[in-house]
Amino acid sequence: MSALWNNLRHFRTTLTQEFSKHRQWAGLILLLVLPFEGVSDIQTTTQTMTADISPYGKLSVPSNVTLRSSSTGFGGDFTGNLTISYWARTSVAGGGTITVQAGSEFSPAGGPSISSVTYLCSGATLGAACSGSQTLATATQTPIVTLPSGACTGGGGPCSTQEPNTVQLSVTSPDKPQYKTGTYSALITFTISTL
Amino acid sequence: MKRTLLLSIATAALAIVPAAFAETSTLGVTVAPEASFTTVAASTSLSKSDTTFGAYSGTTTFSYKIRSTQTTGTGSIAVQVSTFGTGGPAVSDLAYTCTAPSSGTPCSSSTAASTAAATSIVGFGADAHSADSGDSGTAVWTLQDRTAIKTGDYTSTATFTISAT
C-alpha cells in the first residue's frame, strides 16, 4: 500500500514538472485551436423573399390614322383602320380596360365633328373587344377592350400565347356636303388601365 | 415594428393602385371637293295641251350633292342632248329654263340645248355646299312644234353632268 502511494506521488511530481516545462506550448496550442473551432460552427437561419407583382399595362398605337373615302361623289364614308398592340397583367380580383378619347374637336373647324366618328372593335387576342358601334367623344373615354381578372400577356399557360396582344379598330366618319374642303386632324388618346 | 407596419402599408398600397398607360395618335381626314346626283328622273315626257302647233313642254327634276373647294372652287350641272331622230323635232328647237336652290345659280334665261356640247343648268362658286340630304333643281324644257315634223314618237337622250373642283 505504501509502495502504491509512493508511485502515485512520483507520477504527480513528474506530471507537474512536465506541465511547467510545456506551459508555454500549451498556451500556443490553445490559441491555434480556437479559430478552428469557430470556423466549424454551423448556424441556420431563414429569410422570406417577397415579390410584389403589380398590375401592369402598356400599349402601342400608330402615330397617325388617316381616314379616306373609298369613292367620290359622297358614295362612301371616310374610313381608316388601325391595330392596337398591348401588354397587360391584371390581378386575380382585378381587371382592366383599353379606352380611347379625343383630346379636342377636329382642327380647323368646318370639317367633321368628333361626335360623328364611330368605330368598331374586332379580333382582341386578350379580353373582350367592344361590342357594336362606338362613338368617339371628347368628354369621356369610350371602350375598346375589357380585360378580365387574372389576365396576362404572352407565355401561354394562364397567359395569352400572343405577345403583344392586338385589337383592330375600324374608324368611320361620314362624308357630308356641309364639310368645307381641307385637311382636318384631332389628337386621340388610347389608355390602358389595369387593376 | 413601426418599420414593418410601414412596409406592410406600402405593400398594400402597391397592390391596390391601378396601373395606367396612355399613348396618342393623330386622327386625320382630308375633305376634297365632291359632287353627285342622288336622283335624276329616268324620263321626261314632253307634251302640250295646245293642239294647234303650240310648243311641247316638260320638266326634269334632279337632286344633287355638292361641295366645292374653299376660295378657288367651282362647279356646274350641265346637260347635253342627242338628236330626236329622222323626221322628228330638231334639237335647235329645244330649250330649257332652270331652277335651283341657293347652293347654286340656275341658268338665267332660256338656254338652247345642244348636241355638240354640254350647256349649263346650274353654276356653283367657291365653297358651295348643298344640304346633307341633297338639293333639288329642275330643267323646264320647251320644244317647238313644227309642221315639218312627221307624226310619231321621238326620243332624245339628255346627259346630265355634275362636277366640282
Image (cartoon, coloured by chain):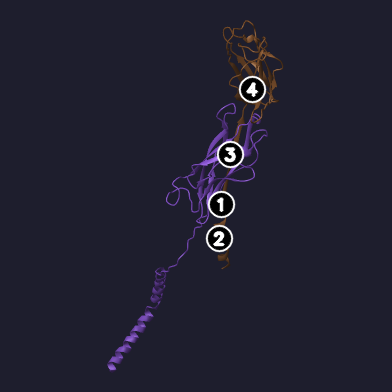
Labels 2, 3: front one: 3
Could you say which disc has been placed on residue B74 in the image? none
Q: Are marks 2 and 1 on the same chain?
A: yes
Q: Secondary structure at mark 3?
A: strand
Which chain is disc 2 placed on?
Answer: B
Q: Are marks 3 and 1 on the same chain?
A: no
The residue singled out by tag 3 in the image is A118
Could you say which disc has been placed on residue B61 in the image? 4
User: Quick one: which chain is purple?
Assistant: A
The x and y percentages for residue B158 are 60, 16
Real-space Cα distance between discs 2 and 3?
40 Å
The residue singled out by tag 1 in the image is B19
Could you say which disc has been placed on residue B12 in the image? 2
The x and y percentages for residue A153 are 47, 48
Q: Amino acid at mark 4?
A: Thr
Pointer 2 or 4: first along the chain? 2
Q: At 36% from the left edge and 84% from the top edge, which residue is drawn? A: A16
Pointer 4 or 1: first along the chain? 1
